[in-house]
Amino acid sequence: MAQRIVVIGGGGGGLGAAGGAKAVDPGASVTVFTEFEDVAYSPCGIPFVHGKEIPSFEALFLADKQAYVDAGIDIHYNTTVSSIDVNARTVEVVGKGTVPYDSLVIATGFSYADPGVPGADLDGLYYVKNIRSAMEWDKRLDSVKKAVVLEAGPLGIEMATALAHRGIETHIVDPNPWVLGELCDPDIAELVQESWTEMGVQMHWNTKLNAFLGDDAGSVRGVDTSAGVIDCDLVVVATHKEPNSALAVAAGIKTGSTGGLIVDSSMHTSAPGVWACGDVCELPHQLGGLPLQGLTGSHAYAQGKVAGANAAGGSREYQPVYVPWGMVAGKWMIGGVALGETAATALGMPYVVGAADGISRARYYPGVKKVRVKLLAEPGSLRLIGAQMAGGEGIKERADFLGVAVKKGLTLRDLATMENVYSPPIGALNEPIAVAAQNALAALAKGK
Ligand SMILES: Cc1cc2nc3c(=O)[nH]c(=O)nc-3n(C[C@H](O)[C@H](O)[C@H](O)COP(=O)(O)OP(=O)(O)OC[C@H]3O[C@@H](n4cnc5c(N)ncnc54)[C@H](O)[C@@H]3O)c2cc1C
């Protein structure tokens, strides 16, 4: 009999798992349950449709439903799994009854943290996630004059930038002292914030939300904060991503300090025959061992491939993470890898630092942009432990490269003498990464 693999979740993690399982055992029966109407769309593109950089939501769909039928993956849309019995190896599916499995993959993703203040039931609070609801919200945005974005994490950054592009008066309310406060360093954040000021975005840092305020019709009319009341007709709730792990917790599966499911390097959970992947999991950061949860869609998909392959009898390992990151924020691209000064300081990790303001193309080539690079290294060995950057272009490629550099243990000396491409339209003579490393070595030589 074909082995029965059940996947809960149709996001990047769940679909990666379904594909990974089929790749190892094409004869397996692979069933996916998702609460949503669709799979195989990129939620990552939603803010850019709202911002009118992408003309329509249709462009975000990556495959049609028939492609999964053809691949032998049985997807049940609009379907909720209400419980898991890890002893009986069954899941309870609303409207369908008890479904047995040989192997289970949990890929239930994330939920936005509950702001925990009065007024959370008002109309006009937008939790950006599902593409069908994003289509409805996009129509409403046409009549929105003033919006508040709650918290400037990755999604809040993209949504604030998108709403400003769309001509909506946009306010950011965030308890941190600057944008991406837990990850980003202030010298990187300042460029983003300057550009938001140019775009008309109003920022309220170190500001706590007290309540959502409603009108008589039950719609949001403003937010009450520690800095006073801000009127608005829409709030984008972009709070911290939390693991959507209640189903797994109720089944007795172990969680870590972040609330995410604990998995080993094969993505196996504490329950026999149960794997997990994506934002519902917790993984240790390779540097400092910090438990991480709520990484990115690309991590979720890669973890899904591993979890699905192993659920089908394979033997793949998920590599430790160093977390290269990047995004457009205001008029800048920002990004980095592993630890910046803010995170290293919070972890009590000593570091030396080198920084440089360089350029993305030859200085005379039209469209040349600034590129700011800051490198952190372990004192003594000078092994790279992290980087942060802001620039007009080329940040993603540098973050990916520096991710490999951290993983492979390259030092500031390696980077100071790296070879680089010089071609006027795409690269300057002096690569900003190399210059930042050279500056660090020069400062160390002077005993600074
Ligand atoms: C607006 C937006 C922008 C983003 N931008 C980026 C980006 O630029 N780059 C990037 O890498 N990532 C991005 N992401 C990805 C994101 O941050 C997550 O990392 C990613 O979605 C995690 O995938 P996942 O499969 O773990 O979970 P999710 O995408 O959260 O999917 C969870 C799935 O589980 C299903 N589910 C949950 N509970 C049940 C249940 N009880 N029964 C049945 N089904 C259930 C849901 O229906 C859903 O299909 C973005 C996400 C959003 C929403």
Image: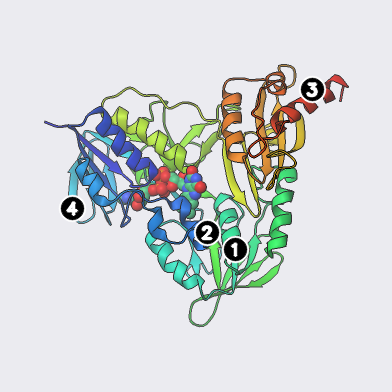
Of marks 2 and 3, the one in the foreground: 2
Give residue 313's quadrant in the image: top left
Disc 2 CB within 8 Å of nearest ligand 1 atom: no
Q: Position of residue 16 (x, y in %)?
A: 35, 38
Which is in the foreground here, disc 2 or disc 4?
Answer: 2
Give the residue at mark 2. Answer: 53
Marked residue nearer the N-terminal end (1 or 4): 4
Between residue 261 and residue 181, name the one nearer to us.
181
Residue 377 sits above or below residue 22 on the image = above
Q: In the image, which disc is placed on residue 165?
A: 1
The residue positioned 51% from the left and 57% from the top of the image is: 48
Check contact, mark 2 vs mark 4: CB within 8 A: no
**Residue 359 in sight from this viewpoint:** yes
Residue denoted by label 4: 96
Q: Amino acid at mark 3?
A: Leu
Q: Residue at x 79, y 22 (%)?
A: 441
Q: Residue 192: image x %, image y %?
A: 69, 52
| Cα–Cα gap, marks 2 and 3 | 42 Å
**Residue 266 image position (x, y, % from top left):** 38, 26
Query: Is 40 situated left or right of 435 in this image?
Result: left
Helix, strand or loop for disc 4: loop
SS at mark 2 in the image: loop
